Amino acid sequence: MVTVPHIDGKIMFRRCLVTFKPFRIFVVGIGFFSLCFLMTSLGGQFSAKRLGDSPFTIRAEVLGGLESRGVLRKISDMLEVIMKRIDSLSKRDNVSDTRILDELSSAIDRFQPAGLIERIQAIAQNVSNMAMKVEQILQNSLAAGRVRDGRANRCEAPQDPKYPDCTSKLDWMRARWTSDPCYAFYGVDGSECSFLIYLSEVEWFCPPLPWRNHTAPTTPKPRGKRQAAFRTDIGALLEQVGTGKESLIFMKRRIRRLAGQWGQAANRLGEKLKRSWRERKKILVHVGFLTEESGDVFSPKVLKGGPLGEMVQWADILTALYTLGHSLKISISAKELQGFLGVPPGRGSCPLTGPLPFDLIYTDYHGLQQMKQHMGLSLKKHKCHIRVIDTFGTEPAYNHEEYAMLHGYRTNWGYWNLHCKQYMTMFPHTPDNSFMGFVSEELNRTQKEYIQRNKVNNMAVVYGKEASMWKQGKERFLQILHRSMEIHGTVYYETQRPPEVPAFVKNHGLLPQNELQQLLRRAKLFIGFGFPYEGPAPLEAIANGCIFLQPKFRPSHNSLNHEFFRGKPTSREASWFLVSSQHPYAEQYIGRPHVLTVDYNNSEEFESAIREVMTTKVEPHLPYEYTCEGMLERVHAYIQHQDFCIPGVSIGNDSKVWPGNSSSHFVRLPDSSGLAWAGRVADPSTWPPLSAMRLLLSEEGQSCIDQCQDHSLVCEPTFFHFINNKEAFTQLQIQCDALESEMNHIYPAFSVSRRDCCLQKEPLLFSCAGFHSKFQRLCPCRDFRKGQGSPATRGLDSSEPLRAGQPCNTGLLDSSEPLRAGQPCDTGLLDSSEPLRAGQPCDTELLDSSEPLRAGQPCDTGLLDSSEPLSAGGSVHMGSSLKL
């Protein structure tokens, strides 16, 4: 800094502000560059639309002169020279501030033409005038266009009571049509006519405009149906799954490892179906939780002990659909989803105008939200095609948006107003949903014998891959276990042994799937800590010959008392639906000797369980519904029979009220308080068939899940439509003092205190899980086959003959198929090797098992008149005649 006399300093300061004005010059320079950019941009836009008498005559007027262009060019040159001078001076040493200001002033004086500021102001004013004239010309052009087309008076909001929302939607379009590019894609340009055309032809809020050409659009030809053929080569599927994520790599390894078992299962199912014709469906699989848009928290944890259950299930779903021969598209990003669906560009505000390019879409809750964002209004139209893979299930009370809001069932995951059978679970939690499941590796006889010979009787493996699962007092019962058994762990770690794992535990680290299988085949015990809930690992351990030991929860966990289930769209309060242990399915459907459920806080009970494990020999066990064949059967039946797009099904059809004498539609079962379907009225669209129905009345405070289970049956929500009427109450001998109808997820039901019969007003709320302490519920039940509770595989195709040992009350024959003389009928009353003779009755629970069946004896199934003998060719209507 050069020191100068005080008075000189004042002179210099004044000169800097008044004479040289360097800061003002730089600001003006930046302003000119911005002005140049603005004028160039405007000019480019106008040039793209030049049409005869257009705004570009103004552009020529404002900027066309050589003089104006010369001014801009000189300003640009001036700024360039100034920047060079500043750069040159900054590289010199001992240059005073006065010298720098003199240099800048000299450079500016060289370029400043006379009247520069006035010219700048004139150009700015011309730009302002140009914008005003452009607006005027555009308005005049639109008005002229309307007059030319004869539409000046045609684009007013029509007043039609059939379209009450037209005016409000028109107001919305005026204010928000630029909020989404999809409106411009469909021709909306800001004019009233474009709004009305869009709202009447793309959407449906306004009536068709009479002056528009309303030639019926050509209906696209229905896609020709193609036959599905079983596939055993998975190469094409592996290519579709893709790479780039650890989650996808894990899924591909699983698909490759189980490929042989899927192929064998396909061959066996093909034999069952007798190579019957199956339609090949076009299916989109959008794995929403693996998309970057949803955060994809799973992929980074695959190699760090993170949860794998969802990826296991998705890999098996993909393989099942592919093996069944359907046409698949797989999406793992929102961009791929948008491309496959063919939605217009934008933010999803506009609907699809063409048909949905898929017959079915499998996704999850994350994917459902992404579909809503991209499909907009089309989601409501096409949601009947969607199947939601939902690990823990969604109950009707949480699914119905309005009801959930009014009664406190609103969560972040429910409220989609789907048919509850569209939700597909990992385990059969509630019959309100469809059970999708997954598969475990199935062992052949040789493998099972090898495992039993090589079991290490005192070897235990702990179910817990993350170190955090070993906290919170686990060491106490591990010490008890350690006194009797050698304990192995598979806890993830990077460099050092996790301190949460006790020193006496042999930790193998995170193992690849094949090495984990080998470890389980040697171990005698697989022990759970209480978390994670309901994963696939216990079933894999049991399938490899382990006994699964798990903690009993007291009280049972549910959405009201446990943080993990809070916020999920399910209450888990029905007794057969409770989370009474870490793995309720293993506890209830498998049980001893393969599964022991004990109180870990009771040391004596825990030690007793360890002794039982060491003295019990078990064979590897896998429920049929978790084999490849069982899953193929189930998925095949869902695709063939579940159709929520039939009018009245996807949103719930009205309850069936049958004309005439209601007694002809229900018959009372002998020695039972329940009713059966009479079989004289059938609904071909109903699946499972009505012949499978058993109508029971629950106790007060009991759900239909529990009431049906108490009678060794399962609740079937499909049948609610047929019992939601007064006739059903009458046939159950219930006297109704009043009959009411309203939205309530426990209806139809009977109020014991008020003697009121209550009907369901909203079909989406038909629920097997609901219960209330003051109501008895009407419960539609059906039978089921042990090891395959889903109705999907309750029987074989009707073309398959009834085999010896197969019960005739399980729906293996179609209700319209006659029972042939000599065909064996094992109902628990006849020996499975005894053929059914002409005239011999096929009684299915109605005769005492010790009573012999005589030729000519009536076949009283509750569906035929008891005095009617069954002749050769006579039909048997009893049981759930479910076809694959």
Image (cartoon, grey):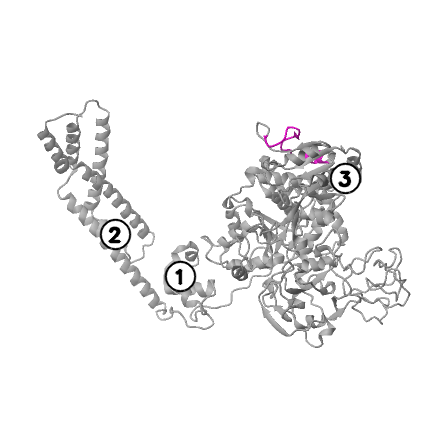
- What's the mark number on residue 59? 2
The residue that label 1 is drawn on is: 173
User: Crowding near pointer 3: few (<14 within 10 Å), some, many (20+)?
Assistant: few
User: Crowding near pointer 2: few (<14 within 10 Å), some, many (20+)?
Assistant: some
User: Crowding near pointer 1: few (<14 within 10 Å), some, many (20+)?
Assistant: many
Tell me which residue sits at (11%, 32%) in the image: 10
* Residue 519 falls within the magenta-colored stretch: yes
- The amino acid beneath tag 2 is Arg
- Separation of marks 1 and 3 at Cα, in angstroms: 72 Å
- Going from N to C along the chain, the mark reached first, 3 or 2, is 2
Q: Which residue lies furthest to the top in this view?
A: 93
Label 2 near label 3: C-beta < 8 Å? no
Residue 136 visible here: yes
- Separation of marks 3 and 2 at Cα, in angstroms: 94 Å
- The amino acid beneath tag 3 is Glu
- Going from N to C along the chain, the mark reached first, 1 or 3, is 1
Q: Which of marks 3 and 2 is in front?
A: 3
Q: Position of residue 216 (x, y in %)?
A: 51, 67
Residues shaded magenta: 498-520
Label 1 near label 2: C-beta < 8 Å? no
- Separation of marks 2 and 1 at Cα, in angstroms: 32 Å
Q: Nearer the viewer, mark 1 or mark 3?
A: 3
* Residue 247 falls within the magenta-colored stretch: no
The residue that label 3 is drawn on is: 612
